[in-house]
Amino acid sequence: MTQSEKPSLELLIAAPRGFCAGVDRAIQIVEVALERHGAPVYVRHEIVHNKYVVDSLRAKGAVFVDELDQVPDGVPVVFSAHGVPKSVPAEATSRGLAYLDATCPLVSKVHRQSERLVAAGQHILFVGHEGHPEVIGTFGQVPEGSMTLIETVEDAEAVQVAEPEKLAFLTQTTLSVDDTAAILEVLNRRFPAIVAPKADDICYATSNRQEAVKAMASSCDLVLVIGAPNSSNSLRLVEVAKREGTDAYLIQRGDELDWEWLAGVGTLGITAGASAPEALVREVVDHIATRFEVHEREVKTAEETIVFKLPRGLEAA
């Protein structure tokens, strides 16, 4: 098929998209650890939820494990960007393992808030998704029973607390802004004295990527979100597009694109979750360009300039 024979496709690309500052920092921590210590460097859990990133680091000498008992003595270990319960660094210390904590600073902020609230005698209603590593890590910062998980509006309506006057809420950083607002509306109605965090716990990158999809989706016939199926913020982007009335699919790589999805599509929107590198966006665009004459336009709703420092001891020499 020649270029002139290809059907035309308008491509709207959301900005911001892809890597956030916390993901950048976490990947850098593994790369610098490999440079300093040499391979292997062990990483507990996926450093971020993206197979491409994990496979790239594995090729450089990172070894990904589920738990610390899979880490041999005498080698460095990195904790993932999602954060870990306090028991994990305690176990590493007891074994004499040198560890690097790649927890996103915005997740660490939620950890410190949970400790302060519990120390002040508050019970915490934590809005998040059961089983997500960030939720497990946050619950692991405080004594058992100090927090109750709220996943849905129904949970918010049903939850019972012993002392409503000693209540606070926190949220996972990668939630749907709209869904979370609906849950918090219920909690504030039912518990007028509930203490809110000083700043929104949903991180800037999650909010910005959802806002960009909202701005773009109504102009699209279809939206593709590049991200992993276990990536909370990527799944939320699919939901945001659908809520705007536009079909949306989550894909990890260009070869996952089903050409039938593009039948009758004149304008296609593309975005990427916070743990998906720009290389995957280009891969998907290049794949589409094999069958369509692509006309790209960026839809920008925010400028991101945040950069997080590396942990002490890993800064550039």
Image: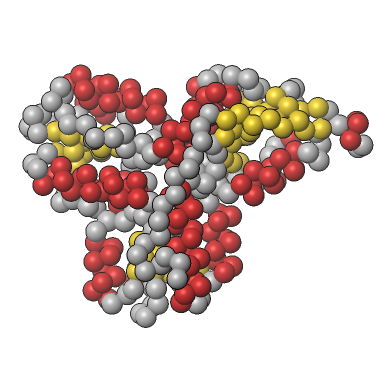
Image spot of residue 315 (x, y percent): 42, 65
Quadrant hosting residue 10: top right
Q: For the image shown, how many numbered marks are present on the structure?
A: 0
Image spot of residue 176 (x, y percent): 41, 31
6 displayed left or right of 297: right
Image spot of residue 150 (x, y percent): 27, 34
**Which quadrant: the N terminus?**
top right
Q: In the displayed structure, would residue 112 be above or below residue 186?
A: below
Q: In the displayed structure, would residue 2 be above or below residue 30?
A: above
Of residues 313 and 49, the one drawn nearer to the viewer in this rendering: 313
195 displayed left or right of 105: left
Residue 223 visible from this viewpoint: no
Image spot of residue 173 (x, y percent): 36, 40
x 28%, y 77%: residue: 96
The colour scheme used here is secondary structure
Residue 73 visible from this viewpoint: yes
x 57%, y 69%: residue: 60
255 displayed left or right of 44: right
**Which quadrant: the C terminus?**
bottom left
x 30%, y 50%: residue: 108
